[in-house]
Image: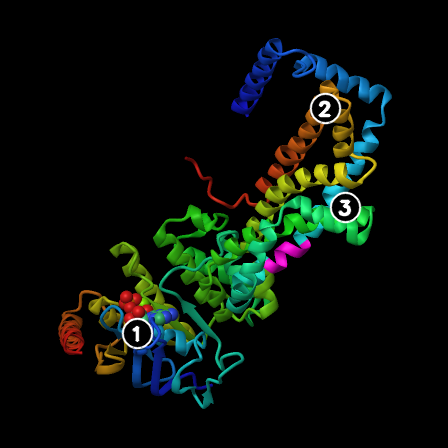
Amino acid sequence: MDNGIRIQGLTKSFPAPRKGGAEHRVLNGLDLTIGDNEFVCVLGPSGCGKSTLLNTLSGLDRDYQGEIRFGARPMTRAGKPPVRMGYLFQDPRLLPWLSAERNVDFALENSNVPRHRWAEIKDHYFQLTGLQAFRGHHPHELSGGMAQRLALVRALAVEPDVLFMDEPFSGLDELTARRLRVDLLDIWRRTGKTIVFITHNSYEATFLADRVVVLSQGRIRREIPVTVPRPRDYDDPALFAVSKEVSATFIAAAEEAERARAQS
Amino acid sequence: MLIKVGSMIAALLAWLGLSFLFPETVLPGPWQTIQVLADNFANGDILSHLAATLGRVLGGLVLAMAVGIPVGVLMGVNRLAEKTLDVWVMVALTVPSLCYAIFAFIWIGLNETAAIVAIGLTSAPSIAINLWEGVKNIDTRLFQMARVFNASRWVIIRRVLFPQVLPYIMASLRFGLGIVWKITVLVELLGRPDGVGFELFYWYQLGNMQQVLAWTLLFTLVMLFIELVILQNLERRMFAWRPEVRI
Ligand SMILES: Nc1ncnc2c1ncn2[C@@H]1O[C@H](COP(=O)(O)OP(=O)(O)OP(=O)(O)O)[C@@H](O)[C@H]1O
Ligand SMILES: [Mg+2]
């Protein structure tokens, strides 16, 4: 099945905070096509609408104009989204009254993953994220980074075809983050998923992505393909070169957005 | 626990000290009161009075929760309901409990139903307000999380909404109990031929301070037992996952 994403003319506005004020247009006719099994990283200044984009793509927010398709299947105004998705939110969003393991079970219970595979899947991802010893802990007993890793376990455990990740590694130390990036690429290569990954880190984006897109003022400002062959070496100078271009584009877009805001 | 026991001993000593300053008809000492209480147990129908009162407390509490919880939750989740109901909840809260009791006894009659209706309706507004405030603190981001992971509406209500409301339900249960038992005694003195409130009023009319204190003591001890031993333990067990708050 084709799990690419086609976004056409996506426009999203939030109602004016005060009566009579202008509505706040966050996404403004955004077009983006993401291939099946493609890994796309989205970069953009804070507040430019990256999380908003994921909320519409995931079907949480259906109050938008434009069209979203997964393969040939359109996102409808109500009902279940047409693909199996995982979403790693910007904040962990764990159920505080359940243990780490039960939090993962909660997601599994509502997924299509057959019960006899749960144990194996959980073992695998808890091991991978270094949380094996913390399965019985409650979220308040985990550090911020551990909670984020648990959310990662949950998002991966349901074996989604499309995975949305909102700055998943930003709260982690560099060593853990590096390992998890490599692991994520490994999982992606083995299981085949379409991944939309949001980050503020241009080097991370370059290392991970097939394509980096820069979002600003409600639209995709630029798309930068990363052609460096895989598997990639984190210290490959070729990555540095692309990353430099990515961050230059990002800064240009951010400055442009600032000027536009100053003018209005 | 040690602190609680210590403060209870201190209160008893203070009572003992004060009782020396006043004549027995005004403030009998703890020992005399306990003796009266023991005599009552030996040759009175103390248990049937206590049972009558506890029955009304329970009935009133159930009614108060049955009315207060849905109203409070509705006000917490629905804007329109909040705007329509908040004035009325305030009105209901402001009407003195004595008025509820009088209305109930006049409209329904001098019977058990009227007593329970009066008790329940008096306490319902406080419970509604408690839950209303609580539900407003609910983390709606967790509903989004549940929806992304394909949870049905029913699963979300049961496994994401309910656990978040439960602490407020438990808090309102304890808090409601505190109100309900005070009203029960009032309702009993007004329109019932038995129960702790009836006995209190009876001995008050006879000017028997020892009996008044004995009944007060009995009732307070029973309610404290329910509150401290039963409800607190239940709550501790239910919310064991919560981080301990130390001040
Ligand atoms: N529920 C909402 N109601 C009103 N405005 C909102 C809402 N959610 C987001 N916004 C506005 O939309 C804009 C984009 O928000 P969004 O969370 O998508 O930004 P972001 O790109 O993810 O930023 P960051 O990198 O800081 O996470 C912001 O200006 C924010 O104020
Ligand atoms: Mg965001």
Q: Residue at x 49, y 82 (%)?
A: A82
Q: Are marks 1 and 2 in contact (CB under 8 Å)?
A: no
The residue at label 1 has a CB less than 8 Å from ligand 1: yes
Looking at the rendering, the stretch of residues picked out in magenta corresponds to B66-71
Scheme of image coloration: rainbow
Instruction: Specify whether residue B67 is painted magenta.
Output: yes
Amino acid type shown at disc 1: Gly
**Relative side of B64 to B203, left or right:** left
Instruction: Inspect this view and state whether residue A132 appears.
Output: yes
Can you give x and y, in whole percent of width and height, for residue A183 in the image? Answer: 35, 64
Mark number displayed over residue A49: 1
Mark number displayed over residue B158: none
Q: Are marks 2 and 3 in contact (CB under 8 Å)?
A: no
Nearer to me, A130 or B100: B100
Image quarter hosting the C terminus of chain B: top left
Instruction: Inspect this view and state whether residue B160 appears.
Output: no
Mark number displayed over residue B212: 2
Q: Residue at x 13, y 76 (%)?
A: A259
